[in-house]
Image (cartoon, rainbow, N blue to C red):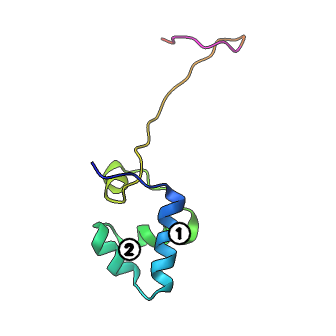
Amino acid sequence: MPKTISLEALKNQLIKRKKEGETWAGMAREYGVNPAVLWRIGHEDYNPKRADTRQKLNLPEIIEMEIRRDESGRFTKGE
């Protein structure tokens, strides 16, 4: 399993490569994603949500959790 990278580290790598003359399309081919995804990461602080895209970019998984509290603010098991 490849090592994951932070979104900020990926953004910095992409911007550096772009400044060195690489194209968004060329980088996107390497990752197997749409060039617009890389452009948005580099310019708009976009954080991809799709698991397949995150895996291709070596970004960590996003895990959603629902936390319930009762009226007094204590955690509950929920139902």
Q: Is residue 23 left or right of residue 76?
A: left
- The image shows residue 59 at horizontal and vertical percentages of 41, 53
Q: Is residue 65 above or below residue 17?
A: above
N-terminal-most mark, 1 or 2: 1
How far is mark 1 from mark 2, CA to CA? 16 Å
Observer-nearest of 23 and 64: 23
Q: Is residue 4 visible?
A: yes
Q: Is residue 46 visible?
A: no
Residue 78 painted magenta: no
Observer-nearest of 36 and 1: 1
User: Magenta region's main secondary structure?
Assistant: loop
The amino acid marked with disc number 1 is Asn
Q: Is residue 44 left or right of residue 29?
A: right
Mark 2 secondary-structure assignment: helix
Residue 75 painted magenta: yes
* Residue density around tag 2, few if under 14, some if 14–19, many if 20 or more, within 10 Å: some
- The image shows residue 50 at horizontal and vertical percentages of 37, 51
Return the residue found at the far bottom.
21
Residue at the spot x=37%, y=54% of the render?
54
Q: Is residue 24 above or below residue 54?
A: below
Mark 1 secondary-structure assignment: helix
Quarter holding residue 67: top right
The amino acid marked with disc number 2 is Pro
Residue ID for mark 2: 35
- The image shows residue 5 at horizontal and vertical percentages of 44, 55
Count of marks placed on residues? 2
* Residue density around tag 1, few if under 14, some if 14–19, many if 20 or more, within 10 Å: some
Determine which of the numbered discs, if any, sits on residue 12 in the image: 1
Residue at the spot x=53%, y=69% of the render?
12
Which stretch is magenta? 73-77
- The image shows residue 42 at horizontal and vertical percentages of 52, 70
Residue at the spot x=31%, y=58% of the render?
56
